[in-house]
Image: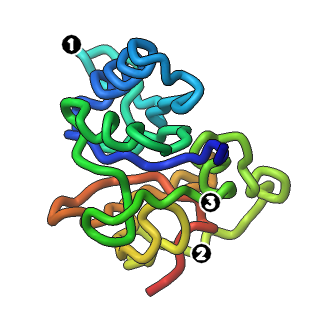
């Protein structure tokens, strides 16, 4: 029995919740719950203006991506890949084997640990808006981006990264990027 690992699943942006529900129902239906134990859509809270009022809303932190805790044996990867709205697992090569996430990435994405919080009382902000940076950790490791905003209170940067030719904004901690 191989163990459960976390994988990143690409889905059609905007269909993350549908995909999550469908995977969960499909696993229940087929009696495979012990093989797919969690489907998580990392969410962030944002404030949107609706009719002139500020409304808190949750939206996917990485639009088009879900995290799945699974033991990908036998039919499981096949069942997941056939779920409507699923594009593919994140893998090193196109159509290659799904790559499990490292523990540290999982913890960071699930927000269990914010390694900065212990000594983040007065960290100097080493970045400026408009600066080009390279992502050094997480699913978008190796991508270049531009600092759009500095979120001092959270000790994070909003960086827009080119993904599939589209600018995608994401929040990253100072530790996850370096100057280009």
In the picture, which quadrant includes the N terminus?
A: top right
Q: CA distance from mark 1 to mark 2?
A: 38 Å
Residue under label 2: 126
Q: Is residue 132 left or right of residue 5?
A: left
Residue 137 location (% of width, % of height): 55, 68
Q: Is residue 73 visible?
A: yes
State the CA–CA distance, disc 3 to disc 2.
27 Å
Mark identifier at residue 90: none
Residue 84 in percent (x, y) is at 19, 30
Q: Where is residue 70? Give x, y as percent.
A: 53, 39
Residue drawn at point x = 48 percent, y = 17 percent: 31
Crowdedness of circle 1 by 10 Å Cα count: few (<14), some, many (20+)? Answer: few
What distance separates the C-alpha of mark 1 from that of mark 3?
Answer: 43 Å
Residue lying furthest right: 118
- Which residue, given by chain and number where applicable, does mark 3 sit on? 102
The quadrant of the image that shows the C terminus is bottom left
Residue farthest left in this picture: 165
């Amino acid at each position: 029995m191989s163990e459960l690992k976390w994988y990143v699943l690409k889905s059609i942006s905007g269909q993350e919740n549908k995909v999550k529900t469908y995977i969960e129902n499909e696993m229940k239906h087929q009696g495979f719950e012990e093989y797919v134990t969690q489907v998580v859509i990392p969410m962030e809270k944002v404030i949107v203006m609706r009719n002139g009022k500020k409304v808190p809303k949750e939206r996917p932190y990485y639009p088009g991506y879900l995290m799945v805790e699974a033991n990908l044996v036998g039919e499981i990867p096949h069942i997941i890949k056939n779920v409507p709205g699923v594009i593919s697992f994140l893998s090193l090569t196109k159509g290659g084997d799904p790559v499990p996430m490292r523990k540290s990435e999982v913890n960071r994405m699930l927000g269990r640990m914010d390694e900065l919080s212990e000594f983040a009382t007065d960290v100097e902000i080493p970045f400026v808006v408009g600066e080009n940076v390279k992502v050094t950790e997480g699913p978008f490791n190796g991508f270049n981006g531009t600092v759009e905003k500095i979120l001092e209170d959270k000790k994070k940067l909003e960086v827009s990264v080119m993904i599939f030719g589209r600018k995608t904004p994401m929040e990253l901690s100072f530790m996850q990027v370096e100057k280009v």
